[in-house]
Amino acid sequence: MKLFKSVAIVAISICCLMSASYASKTKITFPLKIAPTNARTLMLKSYVDQVSKFSNGRIKVSLYPGNQLYNTSSGLRALTQGSVQMMEAPSGAYLAYDKIFNLVEIPFVFNNSQKYYNFLYGKVGKKMLKRLKKSNMHGITFSDEGPMIIATKSRLLATPADFKGLVVRTSGHKLVEASLRLLGASTTKMSLSEVYSAAQQNVINAVYTTLSAYKAQHLYEVMPYVTLWPGRGAYVWVTSEKLWKSLDTLDRHIITTAAKQSALEYNYHAWHNKDKAVAELTKKGVHYHELTKNELKTIHSKIMPLYNNLKKKFGKKTINSIISGK
């Protein structure tokens, strides 16, 4: 990571010297759904500073977190129309533009970070980003969402029977919902900001989210039983095609190199801080569980129909390749 960072800084620094002669300014509007204090928002604020630094202030990125300008869906629509220039949103938000983004969250497949990153930054991930062009978007990169968990009001999850009777809040990703239904749970799409009160009112009794969001939203106060879920999620970082076409080679290099570096840094910290976060939550009374190999095997067997459906939609060769990690 340090070597990559050093190389990236040297590369962008060279660009910085070259950019001193440019007079025109590029303004980039960047709406974001997550709160200003979220770790991802802080990463993006650093990105804004890096782009400004390496372009000598010539490229100005204005970040609008907390849905203060647009929510995710309206923001992406504005981006395709060219009135917004950049966004980073969960992969599920891009399903409205291409169903291939279902592949980002296949449960029980990406059992380690190396395998997941080979997928995101390899042939399939690059193909997904390129396909956004038909929707007037230019895909830059992916960033990991970090550890995914299912928290409940009353129990840890270790067997398929434990899922029965759960009403699980999700962000609306179809594969996650399908896998939970195969295990006997029901699901409902809901904004994360509504989860706390919905749990208090018994509208839901479980939530599927990231460990960092669970902690930041104080959901441990209403759902203190946490099971690490064997699934992954990613944000997709894009610019509008209109902006991309207007940029010269140097500007493209500055915004993409800084974005890829920021994403890799976030990937590292999202997982590096997991044990610390779990320890802090345990002190607050949270019960935490990581599925054993036998528990994983038993639960996995119940969602096998999901993979068969994926093979029909995206091709047996593609799905088998993702599963095998090749």
Image (cartoon, rainbow, N blue to C red):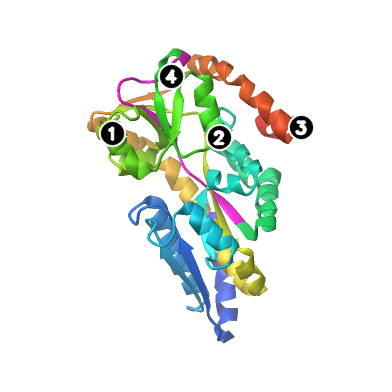
Q: CA distance from mark 4 to mark 1?
A: 19 Å
Indicate which label's residue lies in the foreground, 3 or 2.
2
Residue type beneath disc 1: Tyr
Residue type beneath disc 2: Lys
Q: Is residue 49 magenta?
A: no
Q: Indicate the position of residue 129 as horizontal and vertical percent values.
A: 65, 52
Residue for badge 4: 163
Q: How many dots with numbers?
A: 4
Q: Quadrant of the C terminus?
A: top right
Q: Indicate the position of residue 249 as horizontal and vertical percent values.
A: 67, 72
Marks 2/1 in contact by CB < 8 Å: the verdict is no
Q: CA distance from mark 2 to mark 1?
A: 25 Å
Q: Which mark is residue 317?
A: 3
Say what secondary structure mark 1 lies in.
helix
Which residue is pictured at 59% across the width and 61% down the height?
A: 80
Say what secondary structure mark 2 lies in.
helix
Q: Is residue 141 magenta?
A: yes
Q: Earlier in the sequence, mark 3 or mark 1?
A: 1
- In the displayed structure, would residue 298 be above or below residue 203? above
Give left or right: position of 217 versus 102: left
Where on the picture, by quarter, is residue 4? bottom right
Q: Earlier in the sequence, mark 4 or mark 1?
A: 4
Say what secondary structure mark 3 lies in.
helix
- In the displayed structure, would residue 113 be above or below residue 56? above
